[in-house]
Every structure is written in C-alpha cells, then in structure tokens.
Amino acid sequence: MKRILLLGGVTEALAIARTLGPEHIYSLAGIGRVPTDLICQVRVGGYGGAEGLAQFIRDEQIDLLLDATHPYAAKISQNAAGAAQLSGIPCWALRRPAWQPQTGDDWREVSDWAELIEALKPFRRPLFTLGREPLQHLDEIPADQFWTLRALDVYPGNERCEVIGARGPFLIDDERELFERRQIDVLISKNSGSTATEPKLEVARERGVPVLVLKRPILPGVEREFESATDLLAALSAETDT
C-alpha cells in the first residue's frame, strides 16, 4: 500500500482526505480551518522549500505526493514537483479547469497588481475576491474609490475599505444582494474554477459589471494531472487494486 502525502488548498482536497486511512498525511499551510474529523493524519505548516519537503518525504517514507493546492499557489506547486523529483517519487496534481467567459461577460485579464490598479482607475466601487493581498494596499486606495474586500476571515479595513469575512459556497441571491447593496461597479477575481464561488460571475454578467481577472500562473508539469477529485480518486483506486 502506497503512503500518500496530500497537499491541500482547495475544497476538493478535503474530499480526497476523507477517503485516506490513518497511514496517510493531509498537509495544510495553516490558512483557514483545520479539519478535526479525519481518519488520516493532519499536518499544519510549511516545509522549508522543495529541499525541506523532499526531506520530509524521505523521513516519512512517502510513496506518492498529491498536489491539491490552489491554482494560484504556484510556488507551492513548484516545490511539490521539485521535491518529488528530488526524492524519486511520483507527483500527481489536481488541476481544475479555469472558468471560461460566456456571452455577456466583460472580462479583462490582468497579470499583476500594477496592471490591476491601472485597470481599476475608471471605477468607484470595486469588490475584491482575491484573498488577503489587497490588505497590503489599503493606504493606496484613491480618494474616489471605496473598496469592498471579501476574504475567508474578517480583517481590519479603513475608512475607504470594508472587509467581509465569508466562506463559500455562495448563493446567487446573496451575491445579488451584495452587488446591489454595495453598488459594485467592478469585480476583481482570481480564475479559480471553483463552483463554490462562481455565482459572483453570474451576477456580474446579469448586471453588466466588468470583471478584472488575475491571470493564472503557469504550473509545473507532473506525472499525472486530474481535472476533478473524482478522477483522481478513481486513479488512486486503480493503483490500489493493481
């Protein structure tokens, strides 16, 4: 039986973790809630780069590394691929497909924060759904803008920014109410591909609100890639049966 190290970061990772026995390890960076009802072992914290992760893999006699981190956690994915190569084990990755614009969408892709701020200039009431990154820029908010920032947890804002702590899945009626109440005129989002957060895109489409989409990073190649947890679990089952 192969011993698995699962690197979590997306909702589907928890579904995979729930199928793992006590000999396997579910690893989390420590951001967000840590599950307490799993049969498998749970580890919280970093490893010290690819070399540190490779050493952990050797020390724990891991046979298979599963990368189910967020599509924008490029550094972690690079470390995972590098660690697997250094330790001589395969790395599989859950890489859910990106959202695709539909008829009526006004999507404008930006590569980084500088491009994003430039693209924001014509707008007054942006809704940020990028996680915590905008918190580093609260002192840079233009006088003619008011930011609404949604993150997993509540953080201090300021007189021109309110931070909402909320976790998906989000309901479309609640998203409609948020856009209406805040008079949102532009949405800023990563292209996570998650069904749990997709309703915000539907509301932006309904209201004709532009979406500034942060470009997905390029992730490293690995032995096998899967678009869904179902496909990955099926492959794991096939490995176990052989």
Image: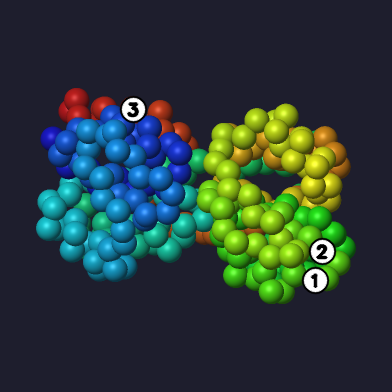
Is 231 above or below relative to 29? Answer: above
Contact between labelled residues 1 and 2, with CB atoms less than 8 Å apart: yes
Residue, far top: 241
Tag 1 residue = 142
Is 179 above or below relative to 118? Answer: above
x then y, percent, for residue 128: 68, 54
Q: With 213 as the anchor, is 51 left or right in this view? A: left
- Is disc 2 placed on a helix, strand or loop? loop
3 vs 1, front mark:
1
Q: Give the amino acid type for the residue marked by disc 3 in the picture.
A: Ala
Chain-order first, disc 3 or disc 2:
2
Which quadrant of the figure has residue 45? Answer: bottom left
Q: Is residue 175 visible?
A: yes
- Is disc 3 placed on a helix, strand or loop? helix
From mark 2 to mark 1, how far is it between C-alphas? 5 Å
x then y, percent, for residue 231: 40, 30
Tag 2 residue = 145
Q: Is residue 109 visible?
A: no
